[in-house]
Amino acid sequence: QVHVAESGGGLVQTGGSLRLSCAASGSIFSINSMGWYRQAPGKQRELVAAITSDGSTNYADSVKGRFTISGDNAKNAVYLQMNSLKPEDTAVYYCKADATTVFRRYDYWGQGTQVTVSS
């Protein structure tokens, strides 16, 4: 079983910064990639940023230049540094781990952390 846990959300003013953290734990053989997704009320969940085990990154156009994703393979952890936050960044942010266990490769999701940006 794999458990994914996020932390670091909160309330911040426009232009402010937040840092999200996520760690995967359990019977993990390997992590293929980890990523951050977000879902605003009434909208579909969307990719924010992702990072592979070899360090390749991918960002949504809306966050390029403002958000930075980084990972720690030894800790099965991923971080999202969010700068210059805008009200439209308000959403529940979810962490996903593409992990391989003894039995299978699967996407494991965290419970989400709320990020609210006030104008």
Image: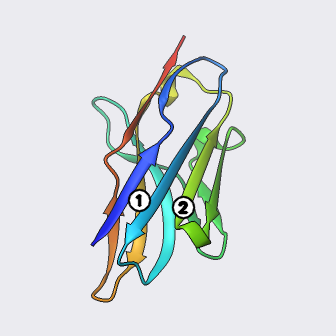
Q: Compared with residue 35, is residue 13 higher up or lower down, i.e. above or below?
A: above
SS class of the residue under badge 2?
A: strand
Q: Tag 1: residue type?
A: Lys
Mark 2, residues whose alpha carbon is within 10 Å: few (<14), some, or many (≥20)?
many
Measured as percent of width and height from the top left, residue 35 is found at 49, 58
Q: How many marks?
A: 2
Residue placed under numbered mark 2 in the picture: 77
Q: Residue at x 33, y 62 (%)?
A: 3
Mark 1, residues whose alpha carbon is within 10 Å: few (<14), some, or many (≥20)?
many
Residue placed under numbered mark 1 in the picture: 96
Question: Front-most of 25 and 45?
Answer: 25
Measured as percent of width and height from the top left, residue 53 is found at 59, 74
Q: Are marks 1 and 2 in contact (CB under 8 Å)?
A: no
Q: Residue at x 58, y 23 (%)?
A: 86
Q: Compared with residue 8, is residue 106 higher up or lower down, i.e. above or below?
A: below
Question: Front-most of 46 and 117?
Answer: 117
Could you tell which of marks 1 and 2 lies nearer the N-terminus?
A: 2
Q: Residue at x 65, y 57 (%)?
A: 70
Quarter that holds the C terminus: top right
Q: Tag 2: residue type?
A: Ala
In the image: residue 61, left or right of residue 31: right
